[in-house]
Image: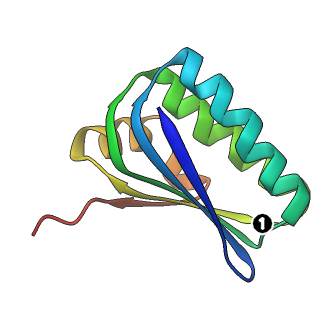
Amino acid sequence: MSAKIEYRKTEICVLLDGEIDHHAASLLRVSIDDAVLHKRPRLLILDFGAVTFMDSSGVGLVMGRYKLLRTVGGRLRVQNLSPAAYKVMRLAGLDKLGELRQKEVL
C-alpha cells in the first residue's frame, strides 16, 4: 500500500494504491491525519482508483478521517471506488457522512 498526498489550495487529495488491510490502514491513518491537522483542508479527497483490495479496515479508515475532518470543519469525498467497495461503503452508511463516487467505466 502506498499513498501520494497532494496539497491543493483548500483541499488535500490522497491517491491510494495497492491493498488496504489492518496494517496498511494504520500507516495511512498517521500520514493522512498529520496532513489534515497541519493544513486543515475544507475538503479531503480519498481516491481509491488504484486500490486492489480492501477489507473492513478501509471502511474504518474512511470513518475515522470523517470524524477528524469534523473537528477541523472539513468535508470528505471518497472517489473512484470499485463497484464492490462502493456497495460496502454504502452498506456501512458512509454515504451519509460524505460523498461517495464510483469509478467511472470507460
Residue 93 showing in the rendered view: no
Say which quarter of the image contains residue 105: bottom left
Q: Residue at x 69, y 73 (%)?
A: 11
User: Which kind of residue does numbered mark 1 sit on?
Assistant: Gly
Q: Residue at x 50, y 31 (%)?
A: 58
Measured along the vertical axis of the image, is residue 66 above or below residue 19?
below
Say which quarter of the image contains residue 69: bottom right
Using residue 82 as the reference point, say whether residue 37 is left or right of it: right
Q: Residue at x 89, y 53 (%)?
A: 37
Label 1: how many Cα within 10 Å (few below 14, some 14–19, many 20+): some
In the rendered image, the residue lying farthest to the left is 106
In the rendered image, the residue lying farthest to the bottom is 9
Measured along the vertical axis of the image, is residue 41 above or below residue 24?
below
Measured along the vertical axis of the image, is residue 37 above or below residue 65?
below
**Residue 26 in picture, x, y percent from top left:** 66, 23
Q: Which residue is mark 1?
A: 74
Q: In the picture, which quadrant includes the C terminus?
A: bottom left
**Residue 104 in picture, x, y percent from top left:** 21, 66
User: Dot 1 lies on which element?
Assistant: loop
**Residue 68 in picture, x, y percent from top left:** 81, 47
Using residue 73 as the reference point, say whether residue 47 is left or right of it: left
